[in-house]
Amino acid sequence: MTMCSNISGNKPHVIVIGAGGVGVIAALSLFHCNKTEVSLVVRSDYDHVKVHGYKISSCDYGDLEGWKPHHLYKNVEHAIKDDPKRFYQYVLVTTKNIPDGPFQSRVPEIIRPIMENNLTYHIDKKCNILLIQNGIEIESDILTTFNKTTYNYNILSGIQIIGSTKIDKGVINQQGHEHLSVGSFDSSDQDSILAAKNFISYYLNEGFNSIEFDERVRYSRWKKLLYNAAINTTTALVGLDVPRALEFGKDKKSTEFGIFRPAMKEIVRIAEAEGIILEDKFIDFFVNCTRDLLFKPSMCVDVQKHQLMEIEVILGNPIKLAKKYGVETPVLEMLYNLLILVQCKLKEEKGLIVFDEKISRLIDH
Ligand SMILES: *[C@@H]1O[C@H](CO)[C@@H](O)[C@H](O)[C@H]1NC(C)=O
Ligand SMILES: *[C@@H]1O[C@H](CO)[C@@H](O)[C@H](O)[C@H]1NC(C)=O
Ligand SMILES: *[C@@H]1O[C@H](CO)[C@@H](O)[C@H](O)[C@H]1NC(C)=O
Ligand SMILES: CC(=O)N[C@H]1CO[C@H](CO)[C@@H](O)[C@@H]1O
């Protein structure tokens, strides 16, 4: 507590990109642990937070007023410009992952300035990109964009379970205890595994948050997908919370037995084709775990806020894998095809796509 400020110049740097409910609590956990110097990229709330800091109501850390990490930036370019020679040992990406969204908001483009800056100044050092995001196969976009031989990096997976929401400009409400699991996407890469374990020591605040090493990242991601691919998607399509979506089904059964369970079984079969066994009890668990919780999954909230959804990493990628393995996924494909329409409706509202009513055709760019 007392001497740390003297050595702050020597602490490793971590940058957290994305300042929603997940990112701000991640920055707070790192800051509290006090072993790293923490930068946070705050896009839309930057001006507010720069002046007032964050107001955080957290079940783990209590109530904080005016909290700021060591550095705040508008975007990644701003962080690089501020100190081009600073090396970020860990780059935490907590933004939504929307590969079908605007080019500049895709994950590889968001981190590109750091990757390129490193090529100039830090090629001797290996940076660790930690994706704290939903979905499956999310690492491949980065691996295909940045050649691992040219750019020197590890890629780590983070799955965070936390009930934390940004409820207003600079205001975070964390209601659920933070639990993060961190591992290497490549489960055979010893250096990457070591980097994940090292991160845990920068992050763990005994008695406050929980963090554990995840040796089966792919398994954990498939498991989480059981819920996300079946339940978030359905509620997003119909705009209902989970209890209503279940109760409003024909004879109170059709949602559970006609949509949720069949969709989850398809996820089980895709994972199985990779040799990953998800037990049936998980299906029972996920169908029921929010049966009594009057809340809308985040994908449903996204639609209602007119924000793009993470449909590619939740459904598009699993369906692609299913095709590759020869697994039939009629329910997931129906959910996906319907959600693509909703996504395009949102894109049209935002002017990201143009439909010409004179000729009744979508204009290709
Ligand atoms: C990455 O770069 C190395 C060295 O330049 C090259 O040999 C290799 O083929 C590249 N890998 C990919 C996947 O492009
Ligand atoms: C799930 O909840 C339903 C309705 O409350 C109940 O009938 C069923 O036994 C529960 N299933 C499990 C596996 O707990
Ligand atoms: C699905 O909903 C849960 C609960 O809101 C959330 O934790 C998760 O991030 C959501 N996933 C997507 C892809 O929206
Ligand atoms: C993205 C970025 O900041 N790249 C920098 C890398 O280093 C060169 C040389 O100093 C700069 O010109 C670039 O702007």
Image: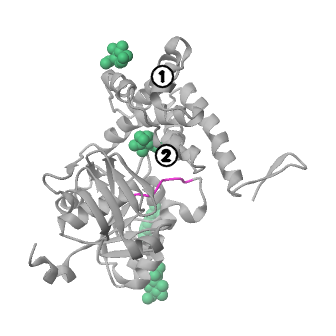
Please tell me whether the stretch drawn in magenta is mainly helix, strand or loop: loop
Which residue is at 33% across, 52% downward?
157
Sort mark 1 into few (<14), some (14-19) or many (20+) by Cα contacts within 10 Å. Answer: many
Provide the secondary structure element on which disc 2 rests.
helix
Question: Is 323 placed above or below 155 here?
Answer: above
State which image quarter holds ligand 3: top left
Is residue 337 among what the camera can see? Answer: yes
Q: CA distance from mark 1 to mark 2?
A: 25 Å
Q: Find residue 305 and report its horizontal and vertical position in percent.
A: 57, 49
Disc 1: which residue: 246
Which residue of the protein is positioned furthest toward the left in this rendering?
Answer: 2
Horizontally, residue 86 falls left or right of residue 107, namely left
Question: Is 257 placed above or below 353 here?
Answer: above
Kindly identify the amino acid type of the residue bearing the numbered disc 1: Leu
Q: Quadrant of the N terminus?
A: bottom left
**Residue 313 marker:** 2
Mark 2 lies within 8 Å of ligand 3 (Cβ measured): yes
Q: Which residues are magenta?
A: 94-99
